[in-house]
Amino acid sequence: MNGLIFDDVTIQIGGTAQFLFDPEIGQKSVPAIIEFRGGEKAYAEISEVHVNRVVIKVGEYSAGPQEKLPGGSWFLQYNKKNDNWRIVKKL
């Protein structure tokens, strides 16, 4: 399974992520699992892959044992200098 690791316990604008695989330009509907800093996981789909940007769809996820957060879609852009993906906006 394809994966991403987020640097925080939630998905936040300005936060960063690392891909554990190389998404191929033009790919659509790639299933993935996200792991958050606290160890929580969520199902996701890489819905669009472009040269330096991707769109991900994430299902409902937990930010801890008592907190469920709604899913959604986010736009990520590649930061070559830091070699990571920055969350730019929620769609």
Image: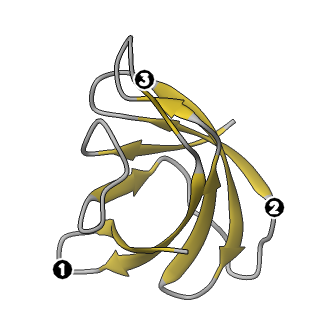
- Residue annotated with mark 2: 29
Left or right: 60, with 45 as reference point: left
Q: Is residue 17 left or right of residue 48?
A: left
Q: What residue sits right under mark 1 in the picture?
A: 81
Q: CA distance from mark 3 to mark 2?
A: 22 Å
**Nearest to viewer (mark 3 / mark 1):** 3
Residue under numbered circle 3: 40
Q: In the image, what residue occupies the spot 28% across and 24% down?
A: 38
> Front-most of 5 and 60?
60
* Image spot of residue 73 (x, y percent): 59, 63
Up-down relation of residue 54 to residue 72 (above or below): below
The local crowd at label 3, few if under 14, some if 14 to 19, many if 20 or more residues have their Cα within 10 Å, is: some
Disc tally is: 3
Question: What's under tag 2, amino acid-wise?
Answer: Ser
Q: Residue furthest left?
A: 81
The type of residue carrying mark 3 is Glu
The disc, 2 or 1, on the residue closer to the chain's N-terminal end is 2
Q: Quadrant of the C terminus?
A: bottom right
Q: Position of residue 42 (x, y in %)?
A: 57, 33
